[in-house]
Image: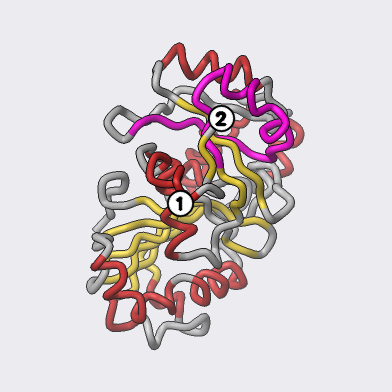
Amino acid sequence: MLSVNNKKDIKKMMNYHRTRDMINLLIYFPQCSPIINLKIIESVQDYLDNYGECNGSSAHRIDSLITKPVINSIETGSYEQDFVKLIERIKSIDTDGVLVLFDLINDRSLRYERYAGISVGISVGNGVYIDAVGKGYDGREVSKGIISHEGYFIPWNKIRSCNISNFKKFQTYQINKENYQKSRAERVKFLLSIGTGKTVIEKAVPKIYKPIPDFIWEDILKNIIKKLPKMEEELLTAGFKEVAISGHTEGKRFLPWQMFDSGRYLLKK
């Protein structure tokens, strides 16, 4: 087992796509990350050998080496998992695939209970590109480029003057009624496919699009966007000319899990 709590393990953990993204967020925007006790389980035997440390983990992801394609073919709807069977499924797809386990500082909501899924794309020196989906959705849609309900662009030289009172002036896109209905049909289809009840879905995913509340944008302005001018040199030195912070809200806060570098995220321009 590899653990972020063991400094000697971190270099090895950075060899995996999603784990690297999670560690990058912890390093550069720790105020946003809800993740603690991040660890990698490399095999069924590894899981059994470390069962006491793994059994209580509150969340998980599936990962693969950065030299190989990302594993995208396993969707799970429940947080209660038979991890032995899940590891076996991972290995059937990629023998080098791993299970990533971690805990969260917050109580985790269900994926249809959130205010928004958001991707904050940062092009250092150029601007901030935001794609977002609204209530009933999560980070899946924006991180995989499936759909966007709202789009924003804040030029780099406007970041210091941007605030919640003028934030909407930077909006470049809001989904129309027809396209929202199409996206809603796809969201319902997905939620049904992972075992969510139809009655629950009908209540959770609005039939008419409702813009993301200002308190979510205030949180993002405070904890990410307004910090960027002072971080410019640090990000460039680390090779982060273009990155994106992607994830979902928990309650009234944006608590993403990951920070993509340019190799994992294509900024929309």
Residue at x 52%, y 47% (from the top left corner): 6
The crowding category of the residue bearing disc 2, from other C-alpha atoms within 10 Å (few below 14, some 14 to 19, many at least 20), is some
Residue at x 69%, y 35% (from the top left corner): 53
Q: Is residue 59 above or below residue 259?
A: above
- Is 43 contained in the magenta span? yes
Residue 174: x percent and y percent?
43, 59
Query: Magenta stretch?
Result: 39-65
Of residues 169 and 59, the one nearer the viewer is 59
Asked where in the image residue 240 lies, by quadrant, the reply is bottom left
Asked where in the image residue 17 lies, by quadrant, the reply is top left
Residue 94: x percent and y percent?
39, 18
Residue occupied by mark 1: 23
Q: How is the image coloured?
A: secondary structure
Q: Earlier in the sequence, mark 1 or mark 2?
A: 1
The reply to whether residue 175 is visible in this rendering is no
The reply to whether residue 247 is visible in this rendering is yes
**237 left or right, relative to 214:** left
Task: Work out how far the residue at label 1 is from the one at label 2, CA to CA, in angstroms.
Answer: 29 Å
Residue 245: x percent and y percent?
43, 57
Q: How many marks?
A: 2
Q: Is residue 43 above or below residue 218?
A: above
Residue at x 45%, y 77% (from the top left corner): 167
Residue 144: x percent and y percent?
40, 40
Q: Residue furthest bottom?
A: 161
Residue 190, label in figure: 2
The crowding category of the residue bearing disc 1, from other C-alpha atoms within 10 Å (few below 14, some 14 to 19, many at least 20), is many
Of residues 173 and 16, the one nearer the viewer is 16
Which of label 1 and label 2 is nearer to you?
1
Q: Secondary structure at mark 1?
A: helix
Kind of residue indicated by mark 2: Phe
Q: Quadrant of the C terminus?
A: bottom left
